[in-house]
Amino acid sequence: MQKAAVKQKYADVIVDITHEKLDRVYQYRIPDALAEVIVPGTCVDVPFGRSNHLTRAYVLGLSDDVDYDPAKIKEIAAVSDKGLTIESRLIRLAMWIRHTYGCTMIQALKTVLPVKEKETGRRQKQLRLSVSAEEALQLYREAEKKNHMAKARLLQSLAGNPVMLQADAAKKLKVGSAAIAALVRDGILTVSEVEAGAGETAVDVPPEEPACVETGPVRDVSGPQLSEEQNRAVEEILNSWQETPDRPCLIEGVTGSGKTLVYMALAEKVLQEGRQVIILIPEISLSWQNVKRFRQRFGDIVTVIHSRMSRRERYRHYEKVQSGSAQIVVGPRSALFTPFTNTGLIILDEEQESSYRSEETPRYDARETAIARAGIEGAHVVFGSATPSLDSACRARSGEWLYVRLTERYGNAVLPAVEIVDMRKELQDGNRSMISRTLQEQIADRLANRQQTILFLNKRGMAGFISCRSCGTVIKCPHCDVSLTAHRNGMLICHYCNYRTPYLTACPVCGSPHIYGFRAGTEKIEQTVKKMFPEARVIRMDADTTGGRDGHDRILKAFAAHEADILIGTQMIVKGHDFPDVTLVGALLADLSLFASDYRAAERTYQLIVQAVGRAGRGSSPGSAVIQTYNPDHYSIASAAGQDYEYFYRQELAIRELLRYPPAAHLLTIHLSCRDAARLATGAGYVKQYLERVQKNRAVSIIGPAPEAVARVQEYHRAVISIKGEKLEDLLQMRAFLESYIEINSGFDEIRVQYDLDR
C-alpha cells in the first residue's frame, strides 16, 4: 500500500530581532528532515535576500498554508548550531504572553525583546576627581576658608560622587569654567569627553558616604549580619530550591524586617553558581536606595534600567549585560525582560503593587510572567511584601508556593505606635482642617526634637465617589459591593454592572445634607502645613514635582540629607523607602481608596496604610503613626492599624468568595474604546451577544457592558465587559473566540479592544 503524502509544513519566522521595528514576518518551507525538530522558538538558518545569504532567524509559529505562491517560498537551511539562545527563550515567553493576555505576536515580541540599535549623538564634558575623597574634603574646607565658594561646592559634591558632567556642575552647583580650569591645573580634576547621556544613570550617594557607586568594583561580600530569623528564612528557601527548584516563594515580612538582606543572601548564592539575578521594584522612585544598597554589597556588577532611560542608555545597559559586566539588574517591570543568558533568580519586591501590571497591550502581570520566564529558563522566583496581594497569599497558604514569614523588625527597631483619629468627631468639634489636632501636636513635637515627619495623602480612588461627612456612609452598588461613581449627567453609576441611580442630595442613612465627593490635593496640604508650622522646612513629592529624569531621586536625597523636616506626598513616598530619622507618619484621608469602584479597594487601602505606617521608627528612635479616617471601624483600617494581616486576609477572602472575585474565581475584563459613542455602544452590544452565544456549557457569568470608571479619555469613549469563571481555560477560550470574531468583522475597525486578566 502506498503511503499517504505528508502535508507540507511552513514556518513563520522573524529575521531581524536586533532592531526595534519587529513588524515583518517571513514564511519558509520546512524540509521533511527537520519537520520533527522545528517548533516555535527554534533558532534556524535561512537563505535571506537576493544573495540568499544564510541568516539566523527565529520560528514564531507553524502552519499548513501560505499567503502566496508556494513555489516562490524558500526552504529553511538548518537548525542553528547556536543552541537555545536567549532570544529563543524570550520568544517562547512572548508566545506565553500572547496566549495568556491576548495580543498580537508582534506586540508580545516588542515587549520582551531588547532593542539593540545603537544611537550616536553629541558628546559632552565629564569631570572626574583625581584625588581621594578624604583629600577632596580637606581641599573643600580650605576653599571654604578662602571664600572660594564655587570650588568648595564642587569639591564637596565630588567627595561623595567623583564623577559629574560639567553641564550639571554649572547648572546645579553654579560652578564656572574658571574654577574648573584651576582645579584641573592643580591636578585635582580631569576633564574628558563622553557621549551625551553616558553618565545619566549613575546613582549618587550622599556626601557623607564616599564609598559611592562609581569607585570601581568595590564589593562587601559578607554584607550586614543576618538576624536569626533572617538566617532561618534563607536556609528554608535554599532547602526548597534543592527539593523543588521551580516552586515560587513568598516572603511576608513586616515593614523594616530586612527582606532586602534576605534577597542579597539569595542573590549571593545564585552568583556563586555563575548565574544572574533580576530584581524588580514597583516604582522608579525606589531605584536610588535599592541600587545603592546592592552596589554597596556587590559592586558595579549591578546595573539599573527603567522607563525614563533614553534609547542610548538602554543600549549601554544591553552592552553591559551582553559583555557579562552586569550580573544583577534592578528596575521596574520592564527589567524582567533583561536578556541574561543564564538567569538564576528573579525577585519581585513589594509584589502587591499594581504597577507590576502593564497598562498597555499586552496588559501582562509581571508576577505571573516572572514565573513563566523562570519556568523556561530553570530559574527561581521570590516574591516579597509586608502586605502580600490576596492572590499571592492564597497560593502560599495553600502550599502551592513556599511561604516564609519575617515577624520582627531588623536590629533594635520596633513597630510604631498607631493611633486612629475619627475625622467625623474632628468635624463635630469644629476642626475643619485636614490635619487633626492629634497630628498637629505630634508634628510640633517632632519639629522641637529635630525629627522628621512624612504626611501621606491617599489620593487613590478619588474618581468621584460620594460619601456623607456626618456619618461616613458611602453610596455603593447594591449588586457589586463597590462604590458608585458620580457622572456629569447627574447619575451615580456602577462600573461593573451598570447599575444607575440619580445623584443624592441627602444621606440615605442619617439625612445629612453634607454628602459629596472628596476634593483634596498635596499642594493644598502643603499650604496648610506651612501656615500651621511656618518654621518647618517642607517639600512635596507628587507627579507635579518629580518631572524629569532625576525628579524622584532629587527629592528623596534632599529629605535623606535633612534638607527638609516634613515630606508630603502621595503613595510614591510610602513604598520601600528607609529614612532612619522619620519618627512620625500621618495618613491623611486614609479611607479615600477604600470606596473606589474596584473590588480590590479594601485590599489596596490596607496595603497603603501598612506601608505608610511602616516608614516610621525604622532607626534607633521609636516611631508613631496617626491614621485619619471617616471609617475607623472598617476591617481594612482596623487591621492596618494593628498590622494584623491574618484578620484582614480572613475578612477580605470571605467577601471575594461570596462575590466570586479573584482569587476565588478568575476575571477577564474586556476594555473597548472608540471616538464615536454610538459605534462603541453598538460594538459593545455585539460583543456581549457573541460571548453569550459561545458561552455554551461554561460556568461563567458575563457582566456589562458598562462605562469605564473614567468614561472618556482624549476624545475616546470607553466601555467595559467582565467575565467571571472558575476555570481559567474557559475564559482564555472565550477570549480567543472573541479575538477571531472581532478580526473578521470590519465594524470593529474603529474600536480599540484590550484584555485584562484577574485585575
Image (spheres, rainbow, N blue to C red):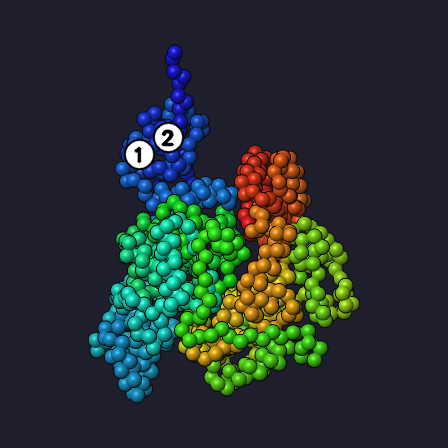
Q: What residue type is disc 2 on?
A: Tyr
Residue at 38% across / 69% down in the picture? Answer: 227
Up the image or down, 571 lies above or below 484; here it is below
The answer, for residue 142, to whether it is visible in the render is: yes
State which quarter of the image contains the N terminus. Answer: top left
Residue extending farthest to the bottom is 145
Residue that mark 2 sits on: 28
Q: In the image shown, does 339 or 51 lie closer to the viewer?
A: 339
Residue at 72% across / 71% down in the picture? Answer: 470
Up the image or down, 93 lies above or below 417; here it is above
Identify the secondary structure beneath mark 2.
strand
Label 1 crowd bin: few (<14), some (14–19), many (20+), radius 10 Å: some
Residue 417 place in picture, x, y as percent: 53, 76
Q: What residue type is disc 1 on?
A: Val
Residue 73 place in picture, x, y as percent: 37, 27
Hey, which quadrant is residue 589 in on the image? bottom right
Hey, which quadrant is residue 494 in on the image? bottom right
Total numbered badges shown on the rendered structure: 2
Q: Which mark is residue 533?
A: none
Identify the secondary structure beneath mark 1.
strand
The mark nearer the N terminus, 1 or 2, is: 2
Image-based side of 320 in relation to 583, left or right = left
The answer, for residue 305, to whether it is visible in the render is: no
Label 2 crowd bin: few (<14), some (14–19), many (20+), radius 10 Å: many
Of circles 1 and 2, which is in front? 1
Residue 198 place in picture, x, y as percent: 32, 61
Residue 186 place in picture, x, y as percent: 21, 78
Residue at 33% across / 29% down in the picture? Answer: 34
Q: Which mark is residue 79?
A: 1
